[in-house]
């Protein structure tokens, strides 16, 4: 088993591609990749890892992607202990057509995992993003890495590189 678990939910494949990119950047031997639709059984899959990258696109009006709904409901009911876990969140959205709810899923995940004791890291400054509103901002920063493959795909590689660099202090495997 690798040190880091990457768990993602993706409807049209965008988050999946990002998750695969992250795995390739970090190193396949260092991360295991889980599709929430195909590989995830229950919360024990998440709890196997002390270091987690959690990916989720935003659908509806600021809501989590479908494959995360049931797992998050179960987690909310069972309240497993995530203390000692370090989690970083990432997710694509659409800052033009859905600019009033930009990457809202990140905020939902943040609130839920934080309430269970996880250390949620990897906040990103809002500078350089164009959007109207987002429920994923805490203390002036996005709670994770927002990406926009619809309107700003040219910025994705640089945003990922900068984010991974910022995670080195929290994810020892990234400095190995
Ligand atoms: C019906 C619909 C609703 C959406 N709602 C939001 C939203 O509320 N906020 C946002 O930032 N993006 C929203 N998006 C954009 C998606 O999050 C974006 O296309 C994303 O890349 C999809 O990733 P996935 O293929 O991994 O699911 C929406 C897209 C559609 C088609």
Image: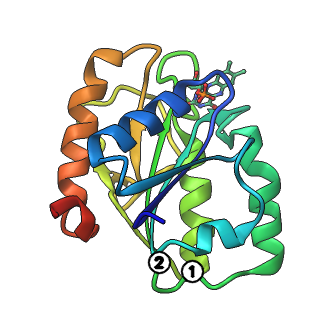
Is ligand 1 within 8 Å of the beta carbon of the residue shown at mark 1? no
x, y (%) of residue 114?
54, 73
Residue at horizontal 38 percent and vertical 43 percent from the top: 23
Q: Secondary structure at mark 2?
A: loop
Residue identifier under label 1:
82
Whether residue 156 is visible here, answered yes or no, is yes
Q: Are marks 2 and 1 in contact (CB under 8 Å)?
A: yes
The quadrant of the rendering that contains the C terminus is bottom left
Whether residue 143 is visible here, answered yes or no, is no
Comparing 65 with 51, the one in front is 51
Residue identifier under label 2:
85
x, y (%) of residue 81?
63, 85
Q: Is residue 42 above or below residue 161?
A: below
Dividing the picture into quadrants, the one containing residue 29 is bottom left
Dividing the picture into quadrants, the one containing residue 138 is bottom left
Residue at horizontal 62 percent and vertical 36 percent from the top: 58
Ligand 1, image quadrant it occupies: top right
Comparing 29 with 37, the one in front is 29
């Amino acid at each position: 088993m690798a040190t880091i678990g990457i768990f993602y939910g993706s409807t049209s494949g965008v988050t999946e591609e990002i998750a695969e990119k992250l795995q390739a950047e970090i190193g396949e031997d260092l991360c295991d990749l889980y599709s929430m639709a195909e590989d995830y059984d229950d919360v024990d899959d998440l709890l196997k890892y002390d270091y987690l990258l959690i990916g989720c696109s935003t659908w509806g009006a600021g809501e989590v992607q479908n494959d995360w709904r049931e797992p998050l409901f179960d987690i909310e009911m069972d309240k497993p202990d995530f203390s000692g876990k370090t989690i970083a969140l990432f997710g694509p959205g659409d800052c033009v057509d859905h600019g009033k709810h930009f990457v809202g899923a990140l905020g939902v995940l943040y609130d839920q995992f934080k309430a269970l004791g996880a250390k949620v890291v990897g906040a990103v400054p809002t500078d350089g993003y164009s959007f109207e509103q987002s429920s994923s901002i805490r203390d002036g920063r996005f709670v994770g890495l927002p990406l926009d493959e619809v309107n700003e795909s040219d910025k994705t590689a640089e945003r990922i590189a900068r984010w991974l660099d910022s995670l080195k202090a929290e994810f020892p495997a990234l400095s190995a």
